[in-house]
Image (spheres, grey):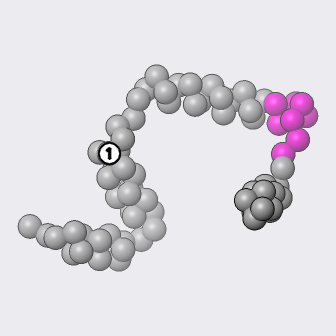
């Protein structure tokens, strides 16, 4: 049986797409998906997308968000 170090080295050598599959699979063993919660997140995502497309909500560039966070916590 492989140890954790061996598994990590093997996984790190995989193409990025396959590493994503490995990481997702491992995370699912720690936090199994909940279909009810997934449905709620889909509803939230659809609502937010509709708000953006309709113009009711304006997007904020990520660099502005992170700058505000750094500013807020620098105090």
| Quadrant of residue 33 within the rendered picture | top left
Indicate the quadrant containing the C terminus: top left, top right, bottom left or bottom right: bottom right
Q: Position of residue 32 (x, y in %)?
A: 35, 37
Q: Quadrant of residue 54?
A: top right
Report x, y in % for residue 39: 53, 25
In this picture, is 4 found above or below 57? below
| Image coords of residue 20 (percent x, y) | 43, 59
Whether residue 18 sits left or right of residue 40 in the image: it is left
* Rendering coords of residue 18 (x, y %): 39, 63
Pick out the residue farthest to the left: 1
Mark 1 surroundings within 10 Å by alpha-carbon count, few (fewer than 14), some (14 through 19), many (20 or more): few
Residue located 88% across and 41% down the image: 58
Q: Residue furthest right?
A: 55
Question: What is the magenta range?
Answer: 51-59
Q: Give the position of the N terminus as an image quadrant.
A: bottom left
- 36 with respect to 5 (left or right): right
Which residue is nearer to you in this view: 5 or 10?
Answer: 5
Asked if residue 24 lies in the magenta stretch, the reply is no
Residue 53 visible in image: no
Q: Residue furthest front?
A: 75
* Closer to the camera in the image, 1 or 30: 30
The residue located at (50%, 30%) in the rendering is: 38
Question: Is 75 rendered above or below residue 42?
Answer: below
Q: Looking at the image, which residue is at 32% across and 52% down? A: 26
Magenta residue check for 58: yes
Q: Is residue 34 visible?
A: yes
- Provide the residue designation for mark 1: 30
Kindly state the secondary structure of the residue where label 1 is placed: helix
- Residue 35 located left or right of residue 45: left
């Amino acid at each position: 049986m492989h140890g954790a170090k061996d598994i990590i080295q093997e996984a790190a050598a995989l193409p990025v797409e396959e590493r994503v599959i490995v990481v997702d699979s491992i995370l699912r063993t720690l936090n199994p998906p909940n279909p009810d919660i997934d449905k709620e997140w889909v509803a939230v995502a659809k609502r937010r997308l509709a708000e953006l497309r309709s113009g009711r909500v304006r997007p904020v560039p990520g660099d502005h968000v992170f700058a505000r966070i750094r500013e807020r916590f620098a105090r």
